[in-house]
Image (tube, rainbow, N blue to C red):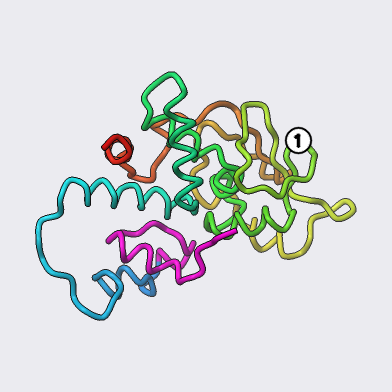
Amino acid sequence: MGRYIDPSCRQCRRIGEKLFLKGTRCYTPNCSVERRKRPPGDAPPKRRRSSDWAIQLREKQKARFTYGVLERQFRNYFETAREQDGVTGDMLLQVLERRLDNAVFRLSFADSRKQARQLVNHGHFYVNDKKSNIPSYLVKPGDSISWKMVGDSVPSFIGSLTDGLPKRPVPNWLKLDVQKLRGEVLGVPDISDIDTGIESRLIVEFYSR
């Protein structure tokens, strides 16, 4: 299975804005977008007006990088969204938001989606009290998300990750129980709860060419 192994900050620089792929580092002066305000590569880019196709491609790549999915998987999400009733772009963002690794990130159990994906891969989370190590699992209303317990307590490293919960606002479609370190899916993500700044209309136009 293919995966992206280059530095995450290159993706932000390629898009030209912060995608918050490195967790807390993105909020410090060490952020690569702040230090190097140009796309990766040796030669400086030529200044020219971007075509409509280039703008649409950039938005599609922005969504891919933000949620950490590969091209074929992203296209499959788009096809799934197109088959549903409603605005295709909105349906696409809702599907991406419902990924288990994103839900873990939204509950502040991880500092970034990449970290959340790793934690899920390593089997540290239960969905409905059953072990789930598939980051692409789509949560649904009524699902519960909890840490894997060792005896009656959680491993020590989880204490540092969950210290000061919630670290960021929890969207309305999720509910966080800080005492039990447990999350619950209350409903389907609303477009107003998705703060990624992705123009889904441009993605639909890209795949409609």
Asked where in the image residue 99 lies, by quadrant, the reply is top right
Residue sitting at x 32%, y 35%: 204
Of residues 39 and 20, the one nearer the viewer is 39
Q: Position of residue 162 (x, y in %)?
A: 65, 56
Disc 1: which residue: 128
Q: Position of residue 58 (x, y in %)?
A: 29, 52
- Residue 71, relative to residue 177: is it above or below? below
- Residue 98, relative to residue 164: is it above or below? above
Which SS class for mark 1?
loop
Residue sitting at x 26%, y 45%: 56
Q: Point out the residue furthest to the left here.
A: 48
Of residues 142 and 76, the one nearer the viewer is 76
- Residue 163, relative to residue 40: is it above or below? above
Quadrant the N terminus occupies: bottom right
Q: Position of residue 181 (x, y in %)?
A: 70, 46
Of residues 75 and 120, the one nearer the viewer is 75
Q: Position of residue 92 (x, y in %)?
A: 43, 34
Residue sitting at x 18%, y 71%: 45
- Is 59 on the left or on the right of 100, as rendered? left
